Image (cartoon, helix red, strand yellow):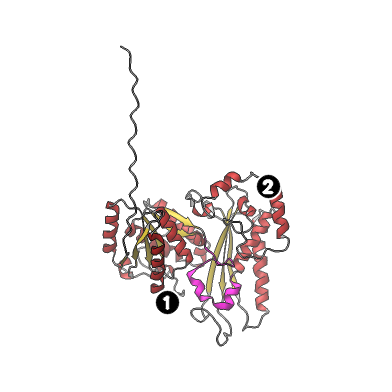
Amino acid sequence: MPVIPQEAPKPAPKPAPKPALKPDTYQICREIAKFRELRRAALFDGQTLGFVPTMGALHDGHLALVRQAARENNQVCVSVYVNPTQFGVNEDLASYPRTWDSDLNKLDALRDEFKHDDTMGQITAVFAPTSQEMFPNLPPTSEIDGQGSFVSITPLSSVLEGASRPIFFRGVATIVMKLLNIVQPERVYFGQKDIQQTYVVRRMVEDFHLNTLVRVGPTVREEDGLALSSRNVYLGERRRKVATILLQALANVQYAFVHGKRRREDLLIAAYEVVSSAQERERNRLPKDRALFEVDYFSLADPKNMQELEAVISADGAILSGAIKMLPVEEPQEGEDTGQGGGTTTVRLIDNIKLDLLSSGLHVIPSSDGSWKGLTPPAGSGRIRRLVDRKRKPDRFARKRARLSQSSSDWETDDSSIEDA
């Protein structure tokens, strides 16, 4: 009897994703139990949740992360909690900017923006717990050998920022672990400006098998290139004018990279040349006019594990980062804008860019349009750009550019780019 061929069974159709539920308002939760009720309801409704942890004092960098979360999830939760465990004994916990009403106004504006856009989710909760909620048994401590329940991710937490601020990443990892346990998001969002923090969080998520995906959004900058930070409000007019020196130093390293420099010494000297010149210029000014600063560090690190490199020899390139300290304002003048706190506090600034063949072709700071981000190109830079463009075949980097066009800078947002961190 002949065998009659049978059609292979058709796979069951995939269920359509549930549309985002966009309630008229969002919940402000100060108790963990209340938030968990909301999260449980969202899970029953099949709603995905993106989580943006913040310490308040929201700026456009935070809002960009909220937009990214809304693009990728049905619901978005923003936390507002000034984490005491990441501040050292002599750091600025008491004076850290707290702008609750302004923060809510900015989130309200985003909700209006998302309301009529079917491609976006919606902000459904602001989680603003008290320290008693977050630390129910033992008050947090800022001592290096302090008592308490902490999460430490070593050796990542011990270098660069961790070397300058020994308890910082212990505090960050501890509070992010607590928040992820409470919020249980599908995705959590951080900014690239705090690049080492993203490595610490990714390592923690992987090592502790946390069921969430870490997403990293690109650094958002002012017109002149200064990376947005809640601490920028401390700068005031005088220090703000000098603060861009950090990015200028990083950009000078990238010019050296364009010229073919690959050794650590050859690259980092380009950064120190810029800051040394600026320090000398400021020292020669009158105290009432100058803004002094110190260099904390410059780093050339492997993008896979943040270990320092002796040379950039891999196609993976390197993460170039740095930190400076803007010193207190000298001889403030009557009516002068000295920033929040009256210019009496030291303001620490950090920044980073990626060094690779593509970024050298994009001329200093990777961006969607290849712009200079407000920087003044050094002498001869036009010739550098022409030489780079002339030597490159038209389609030499086409495949890589196509992959990177998914975002303003793929290494900043693609989950595979630093998956080993």
- Please state which amino acid type lies under the numbered disc 1: Ala
Q: Decide: few, some or many residues near mark 2? Use Cα within 10 Å; few <14, some 14-19, many ≥20.
A: few
Which of the 4 quarters of the picture holds residue 149? bottom left
Q: Earlier in the sequence, mark 2 or mark 1?
A: 1
Q: Is residue 320 left or right of residue 385?
A: left
| C-alpha separation, residue under disc 2 versus residue under disc 1 | 53 Å
Q: Is residue 227 left or right of residue 137?
A: right
Q: Is residue 92 above or below residue 402?
A: below
Nearest to the observer: residue 18 or residue 148:
18
Q: Position of residue 201 (x, y in %)?
A: 43, 57
Q: Is residue 167 above or below residue 7?
A: below
Residue at image coords 36%, 51%: 211
Q: Is residue 258 above or below residue 98?
A: above
Q: Position of residue 73 (x, y in %)?
A: 38, 54
Residue at image coords 60%, 47%: 315
- Which mark is nearer the camera, 2 or 1? 2
Q: Which residues are magenta?
A: 219-243
Residue 340 in sight from this viewpoint: yes
Mark on residue 395? none
Q: Which residue is mark 1?
A: 94
Q: Which residue is mark 2?
A: 392
Most extreme residue toward the top, as rendered? Answer: 1
Residue at image coords 38%, 63%: 78
Magenta span includes 226: yes
Residue at image coords 69%, 55%: 385
